Image (cartoon, rainbow, N blue to C red):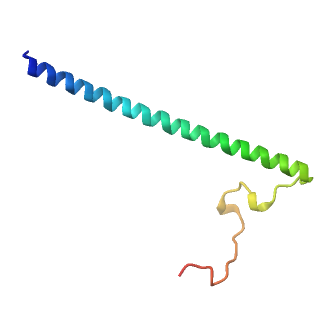
Amino acid sequence: MDIVERLQLALELQRERLAEYQVRRRIREDVEDGAQKQQREYVLRKQMESIRKELGETKVPSSTSTAPRSKRPACRTTSALRPT
C-alpha cells in the first residue's frame, strides 16, 4: 500500500469517526434539552401549587387543565376572531 492510499484510508476513517461524533453529540444535546424542559416545567408546576396554596385555592382552574384538548369543552369565538 503506497502513501497516497494510506492517507486516503486514514482520511476516510477520520470522516467516519467525525460523523459518529456528530450523531452522538446531537443525541446528547436532544436528551439534555428534553431533560431541561421537563425540569423547568416541574419547577413551574410546583411554584403554581405553592402560589395556589398561599392564596387558599385548592381546586385547579379549568384554564390550566391538563386534559387533552379533545376532552376540553369547546370555546366559542366571535366571527371577528375566526380566521377567514
**x%, y% of residue 56?**
92, 53
Task: Please give left or right for residue 27 compared with residue 80 in the image.
Answer: left
Q: Is residue 31 above or below residue 41?
A: above
Q: Residue at x 55, y 78 (%)?
A: 83
Task: Please give left or right for residue 17 compared with residue 73 in the image.
Answer: left
Q: Residue at x 7, y 16 (%)?
A: 2
Name the one closer to the observer, 78 or 7: 7
Name the one closer to the observer, 66 or 71: 66
Q: Is residue 63 above or below residue 52?
A: below
Give the image quarter of residue 68: bottom right
Residue, far left: 2
**x%, y% of residue 55?**
90, 53
Q: Is residue 7 above or below residue 79?
A: above
Q: Residue at x 84, y 50 (%)?
A: 51
**x%, y% of residue 19?**
32, 32
Residue, far top: 1
The quarter in which the N terminus is drawn is top left
Give the image quarter of residue 25: top left
Task: Please give left or right for residue 60 compared with residue 72 in the image.
Answer: right
Q: Residue at x 60, y 37 (%)?
A: 35
**x%, y% of residue 20?**
35, 29
